[in-house]
Image (cartoon, rainbow, N blue to C red):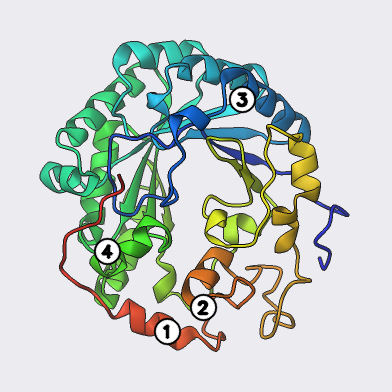
Amino acid sequence: MATNGAANLPNPVGLLAELTHRCPLGCPYCSNPLALEGRADELDLDTWARVFREAATLGVLQVHLSGGEPGARRDLVEITKAANQAGLYTNLITSAVGINAERLAALAAAGLDHIQISVQDSEQSSADHIAGYQGAFRRKRELAAEVVRLGLLLTINMVVHRANIERIDRMVELALEFGASRIEIAHVQYYGWALKNRAALMPSREQVDGAIAALESLRRRYQERIVIDAVFPDYFARYPKPCVGGWGRRSLNVTPSGRVLPCHAAETIPGLEFWSVRDRSLAEIWEASPAFRAFRGTDWMREPCATCPRRERDFGGCRCQAFALTGDARATDPVCHLSPDHSMVERLAAIQEDRAYVYRR
């Protein structure tokens, strides 16, 4: 797969719809950009409805309604209905703050298929501290109960870092208590807000090894009761992960203002040209946007990626991480042990500092 153009281009299967960057929480690892988009710039309902129809025509199967906190949108029910009418499987990604029982029932009636609730820790005080919002944990428990009562599918998402990594077993038990059918345990990805907090969030090698062992035990113990998905920390890996299945290959992300990105952190790479759904169709953007073509395929690769037998498995790793660590988005992801910059990752992974978080505000 050498081409970075439209020839033999697979259809995307997933759309991340960032409805807003507004959010009551201040998580120090938030995946939103440091420069948040304002309410006045958000796409309106009619534009989102068109985007959903174009996504379905393009081959997209599922839409993830996200933010910020999507509950900050007063027209969230109508947006959900538009996605459902376009024939998309709808997944709401929420902090649970801003979604009450009445509103959840309206979302279910509008066609919501699935809900994913983020939980920062298994201990209430720690969870509220990490979220930067008192009472957040209680809201999550209450909303989870309503989700189960309405018969919607529930996933719990836990972002793992040094402060909570040793409680993975308790997090799985909590997800079962909440009635979830799936838990996603995702280690922090260090760009954006997490990059500002890297030393405060970075776990130790011992913690990571312990978490990996715990996960294997938990999967065996609960294999009949809950699906446990896990994303391990890049800084402790031998090979990098493919960026969302390969840059511009499987999914697209629409920001609150309408810019379309290959991944949610792509705007951290300077010099990329992002097209907007305000000006072009989603199909045209998918096939021809300069940002999507920039790192699609393998033509852009240098050594050691260019001749690596894994080049069409991990696609050189994460472009945003490569830029964040080396200043060069075309560089081999330094997570890879074959990268000439790998020693930098090893040094950074050894830095853990007990200091206050810089909250996302």
- The tag earlier along the polypeptide, 4 or 2, is 4
Residue named by callout 4? 201
Three-letter code for the amino acid on which mark 4 is drawn? Leu
Question: Which secondary structure, mark 4?
Answer: helix
> 54 or 315: nearer the eye?
54
Kindly indicate whether the residue at mark 1 contacts the one at mark 2 (C-beta within 8 angstroms).
yes
Instruction: Residue under label 3, please give it.
Output: 48
Residue 164 in picture, x, y percent from top left: 22, 57
Closer to the camera in the image, 278 or 10:
278
Which mark sits nearer the N-terminus, 2 or 1? 2
Q: What residue type is labelled 1?
A: Met
Q: Position of residue 209 (x, y in %)?
A: 31, 72
Which quadrant does the C terminus fall into? top left
Determine the residue positioned at 71% across, 24% down: 53
- Helix, strand or loop at mark 3: helix
Q: Distance between the residues labelled 2 and 3?
A: 36 Å
Q: Which mark is residue 344?
A: 1
- Position above or below: 277 against 248: above
Q: Is mark 2 on a helix, strand or loop?
A: helix
